[in-house]
Amino acid sequence: MTGTAQNRPNAAASSGEDSRRPAPWQRMAAGGGLLDPSGQLRSTVFEEMTALARRTGSVNLGQGFPDFNPPAEMVAAAVDALHAGHHQYAPIVGVPALREAVATHQREHYGLDVDPDGQVIVCAGATEGMTAALLSLLQPGDEVVVFEPHYDLYGAVVEFAGATTVPVPLLPPAFVPDPDDVRAAFSPRTRAVILNDPHNPTGTVASREFKQQLVELATEFNAVILTDEVYEHLRYDGPHEPIAQLPGAAGRTLSVSSAGKTFSATGWRVGWVSGPRDLVRGVTAVKTYLSHSAAAPLQHAVASVLTSPTGFYERLLEDYRERRDVLVSGLHGAGLNPPMPEGTFFAVADVSDLYPLAGVQDAEGLAHHWAETVGVVGIPVSAFVGPGNRGLYSDWLRLAFCKRTDVLRGAMAGLVASV
Ligand code: GLN
């Protein structure tokens, strides 16, 4: 008896399909925007645009990763850590040196007190930190307030958990939400609110009033504040002010950050979560069964630079300010009028003035046109938005400026010449 429907494993089940309802992976893919209109799985917009840049030989201002090396002392520390024999599992919560460095960093930069034992957990990038935090909190039917446009992971993990996102638009051109919309998004079903500050993709920084309102609403509805602060050291007009600093916030806030952006090492996958003990305990339980532990030698290397290098953060910011100014003045030279990024390594611009010349109808069309004719790739902001609010952002393009200034100058010269 072979090949009958009765004795074969159910073909649909074994391929992860279920005719009755979407499989968990399908919820995750749909939540992250990875299902095309016909239901086919596609890669992330970041990978797609990187592939487009490769194919067209364009400068890749799409996926946000530096084209320069991390600080030499951090690379040297990683080599030392390899030679020192850090080849086996790190503790699940992270090596003590890095947890202590994170606690010191939070205290020295922000005056936040977290105990390295129990209030800090190291993860495989901020990605795992956010994922473990969300999975530790969410039940089916819960709601998570998010601000659109937002990074794809938030929707992916929330949907995977059987919860739903409640999106509040950050209104262009200032990308500030309407406080009434913010209030209306909270309900007794709200389990968490995600704040990404400084903000990818818009390059804005959350105002004190906005953060204050979130703390008040999170308190009223007993929600957890999940704050993604991976761009904390790319803040151009004053120090980063984490939401956890606000009165009443620290006891309900999980702060997520990483080494990737600050130390130009997005491939190292070293991140961390800090916050109140009871919430970090939940993150730890989930994280145990995701990656178990992040790469041991790299944790040691990050620990060696996170708190020590005097002047490092200032130099980082100076370099990035120059890159930002090259990009923004190039965009002005091309007839665009982008808001000045206050943080992150992203600028956004309303590109609608360029449609007639390019023969396109939206920023997505222009992104492809630029790749083919100008040699510059950006990402349409609509890729960071669910269907409901997508129309608000169809004229906006995101450009990453985490590239060498000569590369940015070349890209902008090409752009200016093309208009
Ligand atoms: N965070 C980076 C960006 O927004 C890269 C993200 C990714 O490749 N998943 O461009």
Image: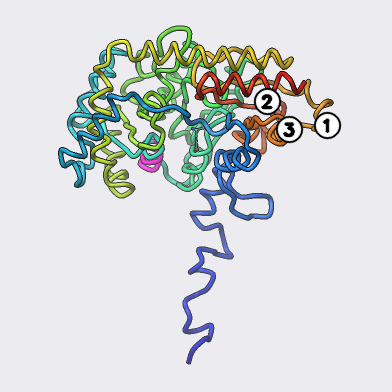
Image coordinates of residue 36 in percent, x first then y, are 65, 49
- Identify the residue position indicated by label 1 in the image: 359
Is the residue marked 3 within 8 Å of ligand 1, measured from its CB?
no
Mark drawn on residue 393:
none
Q: Secondary structure at mark 3?
A: helix
Q: Secondary structure at mark 1?
A: loop
Note whether 192 is above or below 312 in the view shown: below
What main secondary structure does the magenta stretch of the protein show?
helix
**Mark in the foreground, 1 or 3:** 3
- Are there few (<14), some (14-19), or many (20+) residues within 10 Å of tag 1? few
Q: Nearer the viewer, residue 234 or 320?
A: 320
User: In this image, 31 relative to 318: left or right?
Assistant: right
Q: Is residue 296 magenta?
A: no
Q: Amino acid at mark 3?
A: Thr
Image coordinates of residue 278 in percent, x first then y, are 26, 33
Callout 2 touching callout 1 (CB < 8 Å): no
- Identify the residue position indicated by label 2 in the image: 396
Note whether 133 is above or below 218 in the view shown: below
- Are there few (<14), some (14-19), or many (20+) residues within 10 Å of tag 2? many
Q: Earlier in the sequence, mark 2 or mark 3?
A: 3
Is the residue marked 2 within 8 Å of ligand 1, measured from its CB?
no
Q: Nearer the viewer, residue 345 or 190?
A: 345
Q: Secondary structure at mark 2?
A: strand
Residue lying at 38% horizontally and 23% vertically, measured from the top left: 262
Q: Which residues are drawn in magenta?
A: 130-136
Residue lying at 16% horizontally and 42% vertically, measured from the top left: 85
Q: Nearer the viewer, residue 368 or 288?
A: 368
Q: Amino acid at mark 1?
A: Gly
